Amino acid sequence: MLLTRHLTPDGPVWALDGQTLPAGLTLSTLLSVDADALMRVLKALPEGAPAEGPALAPIDPQQEVWAAGVTYLRSRAAREQESQTADVYTRVYNAERPEVFFKATGWRVVGPDAPIRVRGDSGWNVPEPEMTLVINRYGEVVGYCAGNDVSSRDIEGENPLYLPQAKVYDGSCALGPGIELIPADGLRDLPVHLSITRGGTAAFTGDTSTAQMARTLEELVAYLTTELAFPHGAFLMTGTGIIPPESFSLLPGDLVRVSVGALTLENPVA
């Protein structure tokens, strides 16, 4: 089952498997019930008209996107390479407590085909393809979408305390194309692919799998939801295992394609 969000003359509407859901029904409402109740609600809804209008980011404005870092061995190695304090990433990778940080509010997230950006005060910027969990108010994983955690590696590498500036800025978070409704057990070995096209030519490609993660999904969600309530649900980016080489940086005009499982998210770089 695939939830998508579309722009219409009357405002954004949600759709299930290409059929519009009742007007006024929001993702926040759907994520306010437990996972079993969510499926019962969706199956009981009348079939709507075919969804029309461009796809939007599959998130409500008031929801939050968080992210987990250094969850793949490849990510740890890349962070050590870029950082002037390399040992901090080894310690995070091996620590009991994962790195979890705020990424974006829902209204800042860009959707399919919308432009992502690189910071003007950074010279080394990369996309980070990530399986992004969708979590209800009870901390249950109800599905996932493809995510792009665009990052300024030189800013983070200069000092880990600059992480918010490296990660949080306009156009730095993309989600889409929709939410595949599936429990956590179906997400443990999904293929992840990144391709970057520049001037019609492949500039970089990479592949990994969520099976390469060093931490379980339940562990990441548990730390996120400890002492932090999400009455409207939340999104959690789970880290990247694909890092372009140090010689590569995103440029305006690049086209970035992130595939996670059966979902593909494509965004140009503004």
Image (cartoon, rainbow, N blue to C red):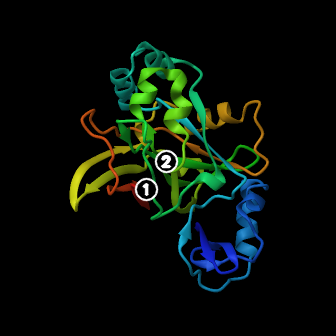
Count how many numbered circles sit on residues in the image: 2
Looking at the picture, how far across and down is residue 99, in whole percent? 56, 27
Residue in view at x 70 percent, y 72 percent: 43
Nearer to me, 45 or 48:
48
Looking at the picture, how far across and down is residue 228, in whole percent? 75, 35
Residue type at the position of mark 1: Gly
Marking on residue 261: 1
Quadrant placement of the C terminus: bottom left
Residue in view at x 52 percent, y 29 percent: 163
> Disc 2 on helix, strand or loop?
strand
Quadrant placement of the N terminus: bottom right
Res. 27 image quadrant: bottom right
Residue in view at x 22 percent, y 62 percent: 200
Residue in view at x 47 percent, y 22 percent: 93
* Left or right of residue 258: residue 182: right
Res. 25 image quadrant: bottom right
| Residue 82 against residue 105 in the figure, above or below | above
Nearer to me, 57 or 184:
57
Task: Find out whether the residues at labels 1 and 2 contact each other: C-beta distance under 8 Å.
Answer: yes
Q: Which residue is mark 2?
A: 131
- Crowding around mark 1 (Cα neighbors within 10 Å: few <14, some 14 to 19, many 20+) is some
Q: Nearer the viewer, mark 1 or mark 2?
A: 2
Nearer to me, 16 or 100:
100
**Which of the two labelled residues, at mark 1 and mark 2, occupies the earlier sequence position?**
2
How far is the residue under mark 1 from the one under mark 2? Answer: 9 Å
Looking at the picture, how far across and down is residue 181, in whole percent? 60, 60
- Crowding around mark 2 (Cα neighbors within 10 Å: few <14, some 14 to 19, many 20+) is many
* Left or right of residue 167: residue 267: left
Residue furthest to the front: 121
Looking at the picture, how far across and down is residue 233, in whole percent? 72, 50
* Left or right of residue 103: residue 188: left
> Disc 1 on helix, strand or loop?
loop
